[in-house]
Image: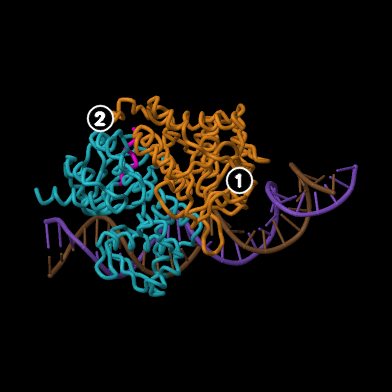
Chain colours: A cyan, B orange, C brown, D purple
Amino acid sequence: MAKQSSSVHDLLINKASQHGTLLQADKAALLSLPFVVRRFRPGQDIVRQGDEPDAAIFVQSGMIARYHTLSSGERQYISMHIKGDMPDVQSLFLKVMDHSLCAVDDASIALFRHDVVRRVLVDRPGLSFAFWRLTLIDAAIFRQAITNNGSRAPAERLAHFCCERYTLACEMNLAEGNVCDLPLTQTQLGQALGLSHISVNRALRKLRRERLLDLRSGKLEVIDHSALVRFADFDPSYLHQSKDSDLSHMAFRKRR
Amino acid sequence: MAKQSSSVHDLLINKASQHGTLLQADKAALLSLPFVVRRFRPGQDIVRQGDEPDAAIFVQSGMIARYHTLSSGERQYISMHIKGDMPDVQSLFLKVMDHSLCAVDDASIALFRHDVVRRVLVDRPGLSFAFWRLTLIDAAIFRQAITNNGSRAPAERLAHFCCERYTLACEMNLAEGNVCDLPLTQTQLGQALGLSHISVNRALRKLRRERLLDLRSGKLEVIDHSALVRFADFDPSYLHQSKDSDLSHMAFRKRR
DNA sequence: CTCCAAACTTATCAATTGATAAGTTCGGTT
DNA sequence: AACCGAACTTATCAATTGATAAGTTTGGAG
């Protein structure tokens, strides 16, 4: 339990540090944030569209998904989140959830109370900016999904999605060699990419045939990375990983 | 010029006030922000993918669009912005633009230097939270676009897009009765909705035939609002307009 | 080890969407 | 008022995608 706790705080501090220049006091403030851990089973909802949650969600392990439910009952997946992500900062300043979050596989989630987080952020602009930046990167990923789903043919679209997931898994050291978890069924991939599961299967067949990647049993294997990137027209700059973030010159220290 | 200036500051203060509880000092800080105004012609780029802009863009009049350019040269529009929007806060903490912004019709833009804006935000958490909230609403609109383009048939998709644009125009008092500006060609609508311009034309024909809306010469006329909303499955809650934002209870005042 | 349900694969066929192309309307310019 | 180019409209036809359905594989549970 103590180990688990420290792991969450460490992950949080690492994540924030990658997106801003934290002062010692910023780190201390993060360490002071209380949280509770909950586990979720595959498919289980964490928060639902229409809810007014009072806690922000931090992924400790597993994969969770953001999705919309249409009035027809149809589901559209919006984004996927893995260890170290805090997808729910998106709703830190929005009262009513406009989407749901669910576990994709077995997931362990830390919950941070919104009001406590906000109180800390009021006094710590460096932290605010770091978390703000994280939400802006999420938004960049949403934008890319619009383009991917709107402008690319099925195989290219699936390939682009896989490039993104693999890149993000690598960033969190969750890839083993050229393999990472991607525990989505072909039906779910279709609901993420705006394709029927049949089209997903066709696209996947093509990507296997051309020896670009394989995806089965929830594991993504990148067979030929550079060919895959070329095929998918994948340019990772929208993920803003590289310390493009070099905002260290910014005046984050409060004056007076 | 003085009039123009005050109009920009007023718009900015109004916008921020709708998304947070501003102290007098917050408003004063906004008033102190210098800016320059520039005009753009239809189709002209304001910032480009790959740029490292040093100023944030505030729309004073006209419509501007966010878009991606694929390596094929194909264009995907991501979002549209009108008077009072500040689309470029999305890049306030991201060094390299992952998308471009262009004028759709004649547009007047106010430019606020990033470093000045950031400096003000360091000391004014209330302002930070208000602008942060604006970027989160943008993100909610991106999410909705993913779902709209991924899950709805062409006519429903176009109808949903029109509902959104009309609702946002009304919010800024830019609608006259049931008509508002929507200066996009059918080709551009296609590039926004992931459809060919032929499909846009077919969808539009259907919406006219069923007397839901009309769209011609850059003007959107909502003929039967409630039937349109029903047809499009449009639920405006994702726009987070209603003081769902009732965050006035939040402690925005710095302590100590 | 066997069974079962879910996920995946594959084929066939229908429906939708996109490409091409030609004609028309519309707005702005001269 | 006539012209011009861009945008829009419409038709035809090809290509893609989706629905249905049936068989296969896979991973757990008992």
* Coordinates of residue A11 in the picture (x, y in percent): 21, 52
Q: Residue at x 49, y 41 (%)?
A: B112
Mark 1 is on which residue type?
Val
Quadrant containing the C terminus of chain A in the rendered view: top left
* Coordinates of residue B234 in the picture (x, y in percent): 47, 37
Which residue is identified by label 2? Answer: B255
Pick the front one: B222 or A178: A178
| Residue A194 visible to the viewer | no
Tell me the SS state at disc 1.
loop
Give how far apart the Cα atoms at labels 1 and 2 are.
45 Å
Q: Chain of mark 1?
A: B
Q: Residue at x 51, y 57 (%)?
A: A151
Which residue is identified by label 1? Answer: B104
Q: Chain of mark 2?
A: B
Q: Residue at x 48, y 51 (%)?
A: B53
Mark 2 is on which residue type?
Arg
Tell me the SS state at disc 2.
loop
Picture quarter containing residue B2? Answer: top right
Query: Mark 2 or mark 1, which is nearer the start of the sequence?
Result: 1
* Coordinates of residue B67 in the picture (x, y in percent): 52, 51
Pick the front one: A116 or B31: B31
Q: Which mark is residue B147?
A: none
Picture quarter containing residue A28? Answer: top left
Pick the front one: B51 or B103: B51
Residue B31 shown left or right of residue A174 in the figure: right
Please tell me whether residue A95 belongs to the stretch shown in magenta: yes
In the displayed structure, A76 sits above or below B83; it is: below
User: Which stretch did the figure color magenta?
Assistant: A87-96
In the displayed structure, D12 sits above or below B15; it is: below
In the displayed structure, B239 sits above or below A187; it is: above
Picture quarter containing residue A170? Answer: bottom left
* Coordinates of residue B124 in the picture (x, y in percent): 36, 34
